[in-house]
Image (tube, rainbow, N blue to C red):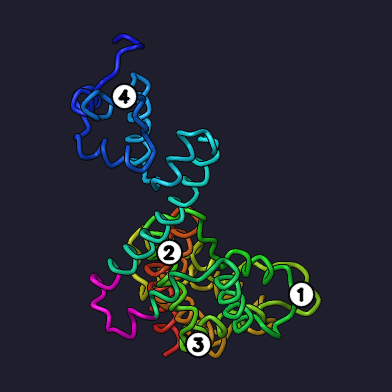
Amino acid sequence: MDGDTLYSIGELARLTGLTVKTIRFYSDRGIVAPTDRSPAGYRLYSIDAVARLDLVRTLRELGLDLPTIRKVVDRELSLPEVAAAHAEALAVQIRVLRLRSAVLTAVAERGSTPEETELMHQLAQLSEDERRRLIGDFLDAVFGGLGAAPAFAGVMRSMTPELPDNPETEQVQAWVELAEMSLDPDFRAVVRRMAEDQAAEQTRSDMMVPRRDIAAAVRDQAGPALTAGIDPASPQADPIVAKFTAYYAHLLGRPDDVELRRRLVTRLESVNDPRWERYLQLLAVLNGWPAPESLAPVLDWSVQALRVRTQ
């Protein structure tokens, strides 16, 4: 193509693949101005118009508005700066769309009521500060007044969700469900009882030293028995039960008797609440952690074994 050649709108349309109507539209708005006019008054364009129109089409496909495009092609605005600003705006739009998609998916899967849908929508749109305040209120309700032992500080950190800046749909859904749980008074009461039990398992002299949780001790002792297929009511289970009840007696500073074993049943049933396990699962999704091990089978085995021996 000759740099001095001038092209009609029809020829420019064939060169660029755009319609005559589109080129005339851009020309009328001063984005691609004609170089000259024919004796009959028709617009004529130089070869530079081809490159200009290619850039305009690209920027339009990327979602830029015409006033901004005109400033870019006229070099009134820096293209990298415009691109950065537009990319940031798109990121916000993508995040909003992910939030909407997550809420709608949850509504469809759970068969939510209009009231539940409204709550989910509100929870999904909370700012980072609002999310932190919501979880902070939950943790205060659970751990408030129980002291400042390192064990509690670590547990509180491990119970804090961190929704990424650009969450996946699964993470948004996990956040909404976890936030709903944290607002549930019954769930708060369950976790509060667990925290109080853990506090009782810390002796005064050792309050600043984290103690091994009874659920972990039970898992280590009863887990192999469950895997081996030992019946919790059988004599083979006696020494296994004796080991974790002895450990619990040591934690509380009390004798290993029927009353203590009944108390341990209540403790393990509390830890075995399916809502608590669900909270940990959601937390793992949000924070990008490996899926937590389910303690339900080993806790069920242990509770059965204890009940047989406390009747």
Q: Which residues are magenta?
A: 106-118
N-terminal label among 3 and 1: 1
N-terminal label among 1 and 4: 4
Query: SS at mark 4?
Result: strand
Q: Which is nearer the eye, 102 or 239?
A: 102
| Left or right: 283 in relation to 58 | right
Q: Nearer the viewer, mark 1 or mark 4?
A: 4
**Residue picked out by circle 2:** 281
Query: SS at mark 2?
Result: helix
Q: Nearer the viewer, mark 4 or mark 2?
A: 4
Spatial distance from mark 2 to mark 3, Cα to Cα? 29 Å
N-terminal label among 4 and 3: 4
N-terminal label among 1 and 2: 1
Q: Residues within 10 Å of mark 1 (few under 14, many from 20)?
A: some
Q: Nearer the viewer, mark 2 or mark 3?
A: 2
Query: SS at mark 1?
Result: loop
**Residue picked out by circle 4:** 45
**Residue picked out by circle 1:** 207
| Left or right: 210 in relation to 167 | right
**Residue picked out by circle 3:** 262
Q: Residues within 10 Å of mark 2 (few under 14, many from 20)?
A: some
Q: Residues within 10 Å of mark 4 (few under 14, many from 20)?
A: many
Name the residue type under label 4.
Answer: Tyr
Estimate the x, y position of residue 295 in percent, counting from the top left.
43, 66
